[in-house]
Image (tube, rainbow, N blue to C red):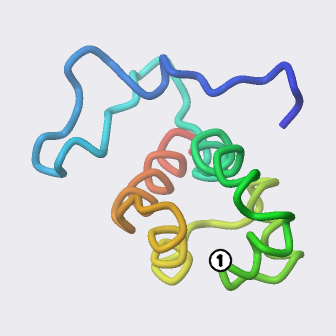
Amino acid sequence: MSDNQKLDIDALVDGDSIDSDLRGYFVNVPHDKEALHPARYFEQLFLHKVGSEIADDKGITSSLGLSDKQFVDFLNEKVRITNDLAEKLELFSGMPRHFWLQTQSNYDNSHR
């Protein structure tokens, strides 16, 4: 992601569209917006935050149980969130695996 790209908050919130059945973790993407790939959430919400706590990408890939290539492919939106990866992301980020799976589903649905 280039420096001039920012997380599109408008894509995250559409009025009162937070899904209360899922404990407030999910929002509906407005019909005129495309959902973000889960890697964008990870990068913007977690990667920068933990960058100071974990010395380098090796520490992050090790924490996630991914190879360097898998991690780079994830950040480049070439990897889909599977149940296994969602569980790893949950342990790393604290966000439930259902969040990561739903985010992937939203992304897939908006890029058909």
Q: Answer with left or right where residue 66 lies relative to residue 28.
A: right
- Residue at position x 29%, y 45% in the image: 25
Q: Position of residue 4 (x, y in %)?
A: 84, 19
In the image, what residue occupies the spot 48% across and 17% down? 10
Q: Report x, y in % for residue 42.
A: 61, 51
Secondary structure under badge 1?
A: helix
Q: Quadrant of residue 26?
A: top left
Residue 77 image offset from top left, x and y in percent: 74, 54
Q: Which of 43 and 34 is in front in this view?
A: 43
Query: For mark 1, does the 10 Å Cα neighbourhood hold few (<14), some (14 to 19), or many (20 or more) residues?
Result: some
Residue at horizontal 51 percent and vertical 21 percent from the top? 9
Which residue is rendered at x = 61% and y = 47% of the image? Answer: 37
Task: Please name the residue that numbered disc 1 is placed on.
Answer: 64
Please determine whether, in this image, residue 105 is positioned above or below residue 72: above
> Which quarter of the image is occupied by the N terminus?
top right
Q: In this view, does 32 lie to the left or right of 8?
A: left
Q: Where is residue 75 in the image (x, y as percent from the top left)?
A: 77, 56
Vertical placement of 57 versus 67: above or below? Answer: above
Judge from the rendering whether residue 4 lies leftward or rightward of residue 26; answer left or right.
right
Report the amino acid beneath label 1: Leu
Toward the viewer: 18 or 108? Answer: 18
The quarter holding residue 97 reads bottom left
Residue 14 found in image quarter: top left
